[in-house]
Image (cartoon, rainbow, N blue to C red):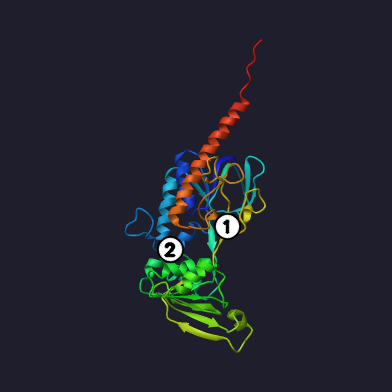
Amino acid sequence: MTRETRDLVIAGSGVAGLSAAVYAARADLDPLVLEGDEPGGQLTLTTDVENYLGFPEGVGGMELVQRGREQAERFGAAFERATIEDAALDDRPFELSLSNGESVLTRALVVATGASARWVGAEGEDELMGYGLSTCATCDGAFHRGDDVLVIGGGDSAMEEALFLAKFAESVTVVHRRDELRASEIMARRAREHEDIAFRWNTELLALDGSPEEGLTGATLVSHPDGLPKEKLSDGDAEVEVEEVDVQGVFYGIGHAPNTGFLRETSVELDESGYVLPRTDDDGRQTTETSVEGVFAAGDVMDSRYQQAVTAAGTGSMAALDAEAWLDEAAARAETAESPVETTA
């Protein structure tokens, strides 16, 4: 079923989407927010947020998201539990086919679908995410002062996590399934030269120990001299070694995957990793506009660098302001085109 055309649809209900919803609703755009499969986004996996402006004592990730939703609803934003499965962006208004079987027509679209951190599939990770297991050192590193922690990965993301964690942790051990890093030379050198960062080569994370009540208490590692030990463990290789280590924190540093699958067959330009590429204005300043007029992007879906709640909120407000300006201009153009041309006898 296709409903009446809306001025603005916001895809995503994390901090970026909620910020866009607040600004758009206050501008009387009557936005519809598509919450996605996991309302609230990655922030709901964080138990405490201490670096978000205005909360000197910290705030729970779920609470911050819930407050944002209540704020957006107060100004008139509507919410619907659905994701976009297909987007027809060549014609106007845009038609969005949703996961609930319905379709929505909209004049403008803000894409705030975020990016999902890659997990490794270790036993216990679902239970302990946010309770000692994290995908963001910048978010959670300060909770591990004096702890022994592991960083899983061998690329630039893992090196950045390790270097940041070394400011707080007693020890940082990088666990990598091969015997050489994929990171850039400069990042690898910085991590290797740091006195508080050690490396476990040809090793993978097999399981996590602990509970939400007591937190993460340890981890099980598996290693093999030729690398890729999980694969060799499943093959029954006798050289595989399994070891339990006492750690209080584990950080996944194997990157993120932007949630842009529904845009891949559209004219919205993406980079090689799938992140939305925002456009710059005539003065060279970055906007939230995309390569398709009327489509805007905000938050981690277009930011592969910072990926912080506060930066996502900032780009969310920018996207709403850009969308409002674009809708006003489009309405003015339509009114001019419909006005009769005066002639003189």
Which of the pair 210/239 is nearer the observer?
239
x then y, percent, for residue 155? 54, 68
- The image's mark for residue 259 is 1
Asked whether 19 or 144 is in front, the reply is: 144
Instruction: Count neighbours of disc 2 (C-alpha within 10 A) and say few if under 14, some if 14 to 19, many if 20 or more.
Output: some
Task: Decide if residue 31 is in sight here.
Answer: yes
Coordinates of residue 285 in the picture (x, y in percent)? 51, 44
Q: Residue at (45%, 53%) from the top-left corner? A: 311
Q: Residue at x 60, y 57 (%)?
A: 274
Q: Are marks 1 and 2 in contact (CB under 8 Å)?
A: no
Q: Residue furthest left?
A: 57
Q: Secondary structure at mark 1?
A: loop
Front residue of 112/186: it is 186
Q: Is residue 29 above or below residue 298?
A: above
> Which mark, residue 138?
2
Residue 259 falls in image quadrant:
bottom right
> In what element is the residue under mark 2?
helix
* Residue under the image location 35 percent in, 74 percent down: 146
Looking at the image, residue 69 lies above or below residue 60: above
In space, the residues marked 1 and 2 are separated at their CA atoms by 21 Å
- The residue type indicated by label 2 comes to Thr
* x and y, in percent, of residue 204 in the image: 54, 78
